[in-house]
Image (spheres, rainbow, N blue to C red):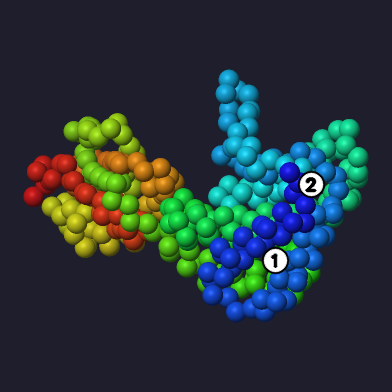
Amino acid sequence: KQFDENAIEADFQYFKYYFADLQKVVYNKIQFQDEIIELSKELGRLQPQTLMYRDFQSRNIMIFNNEPYFIDFQGCMQGAPHYDICSLLWQAKAQLPDKWKSDLLDSYFDTLHQLPVAKTDETYLRRGYPHFVLLRLIQVLGAYGFRGLIEKKPHFISSIAPALKNLNQFLEDNPLVPKYPELRKVLESISHTSNIKKYQQNTKINNPKLQISINSFSYKKGIPKDPTANGGGYVFDCRGILNPGRKEEYKTLSGLDSTVQNYLDTETQMPEFLEAVQNIISISIQDYIQRGFEHLQINFGCTGGQHRSVFASEKTAQFISKKFNIVATINHTNQKNWVK
């Protein structure tokens, strides 16, 4: 019923068993236990006490007829209001800009002060805020550990690296929180950049359900149709890139030839173009993997479908294989019409 020191300690224990201990961190377990008990007592005493949603994050905010509604209340209890704003602003994958966090936090405390709730002095509220940010970051890692590392659910595995980045940033910005040395030692160890990189690599999940097809095409022949249930994916126009086909030495070659590839890599803006493409398609691929989607089509078009679009298709397939461990099928649709 209440998010008191016992409930807070349970969150710390959840983190300890389902995340910290799985990282094989060497630490003094007796001292660590004493510290989380003491910190739980401190946080359990903080005022004011209100209705605490406890899972106030973007996936639980639904928009219907332009009005916001909240879902998923099973963790609701009496507790400090700091926790809810922490869970929203420090959501791992949201990566809110610092300015947004600051403005939303100011608005939250201003509004809270206007409510008929005792002990809402802003100085007091702000003093407790960093401790609840830390508690939320730790609780989330415990959940990701259980759902991801134990139950092997892709969405939670892919959330670990962003959550560790959040924790790393928090510790850098708050050198005195937590003040307990053994707890801080554990947190600094698990959020070290080497551990973040490990989990970034672990998000390259092999998902045989998702099939990615990549087409190069000529705009003279039209954009390829998508016969799958997806109904159509990305179409990228390569015609803004210098055309090797206008040079006599490349005219009868294609984007499969090394000399053309070297030209596009070194003499044109193709690298910048592909970097932008990769950032865009990664959003959908990661989301499609997590949601179990089966198809995604990516198309690259140029004038003749022979040089730029072919090169872009090949490089994109390599990128997808390396980052997501998915082998994309490539179809150069205008190959029979290439200049020989």
For the point 43% across and 57% down, the residue is 152
Question: Vertically, is 179 above or below 244?
Answer: below
Percent x, y of residue 294: 30, 42
User: Residue at position x 67%, y 47% from top?
Assistant: 87
Where in the figure is residue 229, as x and y percent of width and height?
Answer: 28, 32
Q: Earlier in the sequence, mark 2 or mark 1?
A: 2
Number of marks drawn? 2
Amino acid at pointer 1: Glu
The answer to whether the residues at label 2 and label 1 have Cβ atoms under 8 Å apart is: no
Residue identified by numbered label 2: 80
Q: Is residue 212 left or right of residue 143?
A: left
Q: Is residue 18 visible?
A: yes
- At label 2, counting other C-alpha atoms closer than 10 Å, the crowd grade (few under 14, some 14-19, many 20 or more) is many
Q: Residue furthest top?
A: 65
Badge 1 crowding class, 10 Å Cα cut-off, few under 14, some 14 to 19, many 20 or more, is few
Q: Quadrant of residue 240?
A: top left
Element carrying mark 1: helix
Residue on which the image places disc 1: 172
Q: Nearer the viewer, residue 181 or 280?
A: 181
At x 75%, y 71%, the residue is 34
Q: CA distance from mark 2 to mark 1?
A: 25 Å
**The disc labelled 2 sits on which kind of residue?**
Ala
- For image coordinates 68% across by 58% down, the residue present is 10
Dot label at residue 57 = none
Report the side of 115 relative to 98 (left or right). right
Instruction: Give the quadrant of residue 288.
Output: top left
